[in-house]
Image: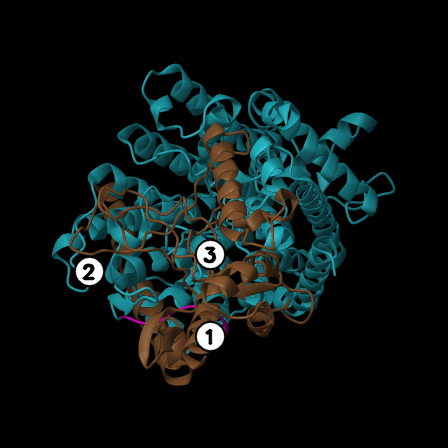
Chain colours: A brown, B cyan
């Protein structure tokens, strides 16, 4: 009995020492080495791919934002500022509830199933809004033209991209609101459309923040 | 180019990359676990542990090493989370509650990485980097060690002493020679493409419309690399690999899928080399690859077809998916993560089509053996191979053999116990959760999909996957506790039987190959193996699947 107890204690001691040594290797040395290399070689990427407009940081090119008007009095949900290109719906984002000294972005998806009634309603509402917002005199959006990414939330809630189809659909509205020609805005979208990597990896896409920054520059010029 | 064609081409590129790595990595790992020399840094580590790296262990001693190391791992990680509030470098984040800390500690030690917390707002730098990421390495190394011990049970022909190697040596070598070098390269590649890697705490940045936003900095690239490579899957952020800071581009997405599958597939080569016939490795690989390709094709088909009211209305299965990855690559990722024990997600499975969600669940129910978790996939498939030769033996009335070992009553008992553990855990806990009044309150969706949320949770936990139908609010005492128990038993009971089986095999005198021996290196055997896997799993889980994903998928 006594020897088996001693053996167990010895074994657990060895296990603890093994964990501590391996923690030193994989939990201290390894991440510090990677951090050193990343910060040395590509600090911009390692620190969140921040992007500037007029010399000020306006966000990360990787993190989607919302482009809304300020909340009016008594308003609960903000209205989109239709002057700017709009991103995808963000119905899955969480609210910071634990460490409330911070105002953190909480990534998240809706996790609603394909037969969930709430999701069906969200899709219906989003589609109606996309049609209404983007139909301007001389250009009417047909329901069949609304692409799927315009009416669904992404996996992270922070998708920085929209499909080129959704960007094209917003061109007439954006041109009108900014007193630009449709061709000017369409050219801007084309310039900011990224194709598949090597022609086959991923999907074609438009980065909304980068597009809006370019749009802001264009309107400032004209 | 159509999205379907782009998806297929990405799959082909992935296969090509895995094929290129297969022989060199498989051979290298065989050398790692057969080498008799120690690196200088390893000698230092053994001195620190106080273990003799050359002492051979029989299966009970090997198992005691596994259990002791894992027990200490759970206690250490539990303590780290409970003390987070007073630890420096924790960004002022609060300590984790006892039930959630237990669940998370068990989750990371068992290679599951089920997460009932929001990474962003719960875990500071110290717990993430020195706690969770460390278990990403060592839990993977434990899985590989157990697999190698089983392979030695088949491979060691002359000794008949039942010795399986030394646990501490296998553990340390898995970390120093396999996981750390690979993870280091992968982490640098990821950081070069935009995955963040810093210790700057909570970062405040301006916004386009004015005002500011706050996001978490952290050692994400270093954790992301081992999260995929070690088939762990625990995200730094809540959205896991859908989060742009974890997975910023289409390339990183494909690269992460490659990392998930790299070691599990290559281990079949290691197995072949160690048992002295690479063809035996190819036969196991063929069975794994068949299931994996079949599942991927099925997933792509159902996701592109996007059946289900909301998805049909939207015009595509884009809910819960990122634009940059698209439907094709998201489907490939979802299958890779659930056919291994990873559980990382680049798109949220709960919003997949009904049948697509069923495919992810069925992948886990197979026992994650195609190709499975690092180590656990190989030993799971080898146990299935033992069952397959037994079934074949029954058909022709011969004593079954595998790799020159007789599969007798004792071996079959161990293999059968292994097979029964996870279904027993999954079905019992699911039934209990549904029979009790309160657990059902955690569901987000109702009906068949609500049932699927709970079935998915226990399937994921007992198979040590860690992905979720994340609509389920799993941060309750009931789910934290029962899922924790399912993870513990689902990880370590199978290991007990695997090591017992290995010990039993290692004591046998090899039987010579005769004209009547079932040739286990031939395609016929691979087919038999696939058939066995599908039939055993199908018979076990069909009623449960019929109530959940099949009901939802057929209604759509």
In the drawing, does residue B17 fall left or right of residue A169?
Answer: right
Q: Are marks 2 and 1 on the same chain?
A: no
> Spatial distance from mark 2 to mark 1, Cα to Cα?
39 Å
Task: Identify the element where label 3 is drawn.
Answer: loop
For disc 3, the marked residue is A87
Disc ID at residue A214: 1
At x 41% / y 19%, what residue is drawn? B434
- In which quadrant of the rendered image does the C terminus of chain B lie? top right
* Magenta region: B187-199
Q: Quadrant of residue A48?
A: bottom left
Measure the alpha-carbon separation of dots 3 and 1.
Answer: 15 Å
Helix, strand or loop at disc 2? loop
Percent position (x, y) of residue B97?
Answer: 20, 41
Q: Residue furthest left?
A: B86
Indicate the quadrant containing the N terminus of chain B: top left, top right, bottom left or bottom right. bottom right
Q: Residue at x 56, y 35 (%)?
A: B310
Residue A27 drawn at (x, y percent):
32, 65
Parent chain of label 2:
B
């Amino acid at each position: 009995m006594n020897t088996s107890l001693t053996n167990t204690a010895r074994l657990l001691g060895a296990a603890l020492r093994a964990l501590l040594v391996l923690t030193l290797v994989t939990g201290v040395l390894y991440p510090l080495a990677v951090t050193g290399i990343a910060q040395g070689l590509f600090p911009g990427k390692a620190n969140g791919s921040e992007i500037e407009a007029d010399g000020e940081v306006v966000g990360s090119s990787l993190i989607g934002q919302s482009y809304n008007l300020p909340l009016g009095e008594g308003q609960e949900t903000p209205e989109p500022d239709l002057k700017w290109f709009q991103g995808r719906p963000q119905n899955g984002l969480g609210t910071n509830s634990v460490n409330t000294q911070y105002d953190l972005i909480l990534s998240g998806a809706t996790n609603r199933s394909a037969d969930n009634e709430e999701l069906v309603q969200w899709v219906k509402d989003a589609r109606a809004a996309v049609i209404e917002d983007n139909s301007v005199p001389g250009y009417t959006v047909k329901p069949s033209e609304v692409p799927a990414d315009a009416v669904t939330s992404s996996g992270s809630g922070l998708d920085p991209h929209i499909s080129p189809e959704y960007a094209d659909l917003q061109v007439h509205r954006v041109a009108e609101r900014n007193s630009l020609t449709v061709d000017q805005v369409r050219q801007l979208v084309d310039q900011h459309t990224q194709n598949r990597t090597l022609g086959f990896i991923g999907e074609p896409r438009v980065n909304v923040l980068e597009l809006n920054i370019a749009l802001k520059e264009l309107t400032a010029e004209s | 180019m159509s999205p379907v064609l782009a998806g297929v081409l990405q799959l082909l590129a992935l296969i090509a990359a895995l094929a290129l790595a297969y022989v060199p990595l498989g051979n290298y790992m065989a050398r790692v676990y057969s080498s008799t020399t120690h690196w200088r840094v390893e000698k230092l580590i053994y001195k620190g542990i106080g273990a003799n790296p050359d002492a051979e262990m029989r299966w009970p001693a090997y198992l005691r090493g596994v259990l002791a190391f894992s027990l200490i791992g759970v206690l250490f990680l539990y303590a780290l989370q409970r003390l987070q509030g007073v630890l420096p470098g924790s960004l002022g984040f609060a300590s984790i509650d006892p039930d959630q800390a237990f669940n998370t500690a068990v989750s990371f030690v068992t290679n599951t990485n089920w997460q009932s917390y929001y990474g962003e707002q719960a875990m500071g730098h110290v717990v993430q980097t020195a706690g969770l990421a460390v278990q990403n390495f060592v839990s993977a190394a434990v899985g590989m060690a157990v697999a190698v011990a089983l392979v030695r049970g088949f491979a060691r022909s002359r000794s008949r002493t039942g010795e399986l190697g030394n646990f501490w040596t296998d553990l340390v070598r898995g970390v120093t020679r396999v996981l750390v070098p690979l993870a280091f390269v992968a982490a640098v590649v990821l950081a070069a493409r935009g995955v963040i890697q810093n210790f700057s705490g909570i970062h405040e940045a301006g916004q386009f419309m004015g005002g500011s936003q706050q996001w978490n900095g952290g050692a994400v690239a270093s954790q992301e690399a081992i999260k995929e490579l070690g088939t762990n899957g625990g995200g730094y952020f809540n959205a896991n690999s859908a989060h742009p800071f974890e997975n910023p581009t289409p390339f990183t997405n494909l690269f992460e899928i490659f990392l998930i599958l790299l070691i599990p597939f290559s281990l079949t080569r290691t197995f072949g080399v160690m048992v002295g016939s690479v063809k035996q490795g190819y036969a196991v690989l063929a069975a794994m690859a068949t299931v994996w390709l079949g599942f991927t094709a099925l997933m792509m088909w159902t996701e592109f077809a996007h059946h289900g009211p909301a998805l049909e209305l939207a015009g595509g299965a884009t809910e819960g998916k990122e634009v940059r990855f698209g439907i094709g690559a998201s489907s490939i990722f979802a299958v890779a993560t659930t056919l291994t024990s990873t559980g990382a997600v680049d798109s949220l499975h709960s919003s997949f089509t009904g049948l697509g969600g069923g495919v992810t669940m069925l992948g886990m129910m197979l026992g994650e053996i195609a190709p499975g978790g690092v180590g656990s996939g190989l030993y799971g498939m080898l146990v299935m191979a033992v069952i397959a030769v037994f079934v074949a033996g029954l058909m022709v009335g011969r004593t079954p053999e595998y790799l020159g070992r007789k599969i007798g009553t004792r071996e079959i008992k161990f293999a059968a116990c292994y097979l029964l553990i996870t279904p027993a855990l999954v079905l019992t806990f699911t039934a209990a959760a549904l029979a009790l009044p309160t657990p059902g309150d955690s569901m987000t969706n109702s009906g068949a999909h609500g049932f699927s949320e709970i079935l998915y949770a226990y399937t994921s936990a007992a198979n040590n996957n860690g992905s979720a139908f994340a609509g389920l609010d799993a941060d309750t005492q009931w789910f934290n506790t029962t899922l924790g128990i399912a993870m513990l038993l689902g990880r370590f009971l199978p290991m007990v039987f695997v090591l017992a089986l290995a010990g039993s095999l290692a004591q046998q005198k090899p039987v010579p190959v005769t004209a009547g021996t079932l040739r286990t290196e031939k395609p016929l055997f691979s087919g038999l193996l696939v058939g066995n896997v599908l039939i055993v799993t199908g018979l076990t889980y069909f009623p449960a699947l019929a109530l959940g994903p099949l009901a939802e998928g057929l209604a759509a």
